[in-house]
Image (tube, rainbow, N blue to C red):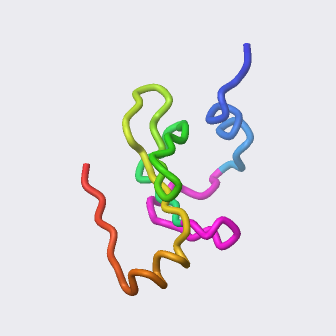
Amino acid sequence: MAQTLAEFCSDHAPAGGPAFCAEPWYNRYGDSIHFHWRRDEFYRDRIDDKVSVYRATATKETVGCAINGITALSKRLGDFGIELNE
């Protein structure tokens, strides 16, 4: 039987590897910010060309998000904040 990606990663992770840390990170090559607040196996649900949400494969709950085009957004909007609610 085929393994899920989460099972594969779990099986091949180094012993005592880094713990999950829920904090956003910037991908300079994709010019996007990604944030996962839960460590679930997920799929991407693209909302539009700027926003995607990550949904848990098992439950379809939102477990993260991505915002694309950060450089253009910051030039257009200046300083701005992003607030995520449940």
Expressed as whole percent of the image width and height from the top left, the position of residue 30 reads: 66, 65
80 relative position to 20: left or right: left
* Front one among 40 and 18: 40
Expressed as whole percent of the image width and height from the top left, the position of residue 33 reads: 52, 66
Quadrant in the picture for the N terminus: top right
Judged from this view, the residue extending furthest toward the top is 1
Residue at the image position 34 percent from the left and 79 percent from the top: 80
* Front one among 14 and 37: 37
Residue at the image position 25 percent from the left and 55 percent from the top: 85
Segment colored magenta: 16-32
In the image, is residue 61 above or below residue 18?
above
In the image, is residue 45 above or below residue 77?
above
Majority secondary structure of the magenta segment? loop
Q: Is residue 30 magenta?
A: yes
The quarter holding residue 82 reads bottom left
In the image, is residue 83 above or below residue 2?
below
Residue at the image position 74 percent from the left and 41 percent from the top: 12
Q: Is residue 17 magenta?
A: yes
